[in-house]
Amino acid sequence: MLTTRRIFLMTVSASAAGLGSGAYAQAMVDETSPQATALGYVAEATKADVKKFPKYAAGQVCGNCALYQGKATDAAAACPLFAGKQVSGKGWCSAWAKKG
């Protein structure tokens, strides 16, 4: 329940700020940006730093995260954590949450 509430609040916050995805093409998240670095975002989940982010488990990818705003099969889609940017469907970050 806590994870669902957290996801809801993050999504609402991003949407309220006008940061939701649009119908236009968005740039990909830069793995070296401060926010991506803080969240441990990598475009390829298998490259996640498991020492720094022990929460990572094999099989966790952006495409099956509750925050991913595309279909699980999409190569990339918007994520409310990265305003105006797309994440790789094969990516991962420490905010990963199981899709309900």
Image (spheres, rainbow, N blue to C red):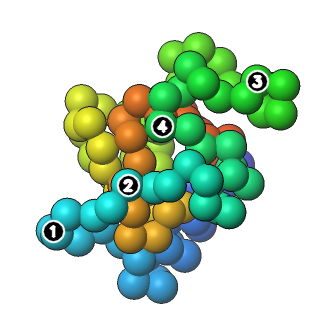
Give the residue drawn at x 39%, y 40%.
Answer: 88
Indicate which disc, 3 or 2, sits on the residue closer to the N terminus.
Answer: 2
Give the amino acid at mark 3. Val
Foreground mark, 1 or 3, reads 3
Q: Residue beneath label 1, please?
A: 23
Q: Residue beneath label 4, please?
A: 43
Circles 2 and 4: CB atoms closer than 8 Å? yes
Give the label on residue 28, or none: 2
For residue 33, side relative to residue 75 (left or right): right
- Other residues around mark 1 within 10 Å, as few (<14) / some (14–19) / many (≥20): few
* Secondary structure of the residue carrying numbered label 2: strand
Residue 52 x, y percent position in the rendering: 83, 33
Give the residue drawn at x 24%, y 30%.
Answer: 73
Give the amino acid at mark 2. Met
Indicate which disc, 4 or 1, sits on the residue closer to the N terminus.
Answer: 1
- Other residues around mark 4 within 10 Å, as few (<14) / some (14–19) / many (≥20): many
Q: Residue furthest top?
A: 58
Give the label on residue 50, or none: 3
Residue 6 x, y percent position in the rendering: 65, 57
* Secondary structure of the residue carrying numbered label 4: loop
Above or below, 33 against 51 in this view is: below
Indicate which disc, 2 or 4, sits on the residue closer to the N terminus.
Answer: 2
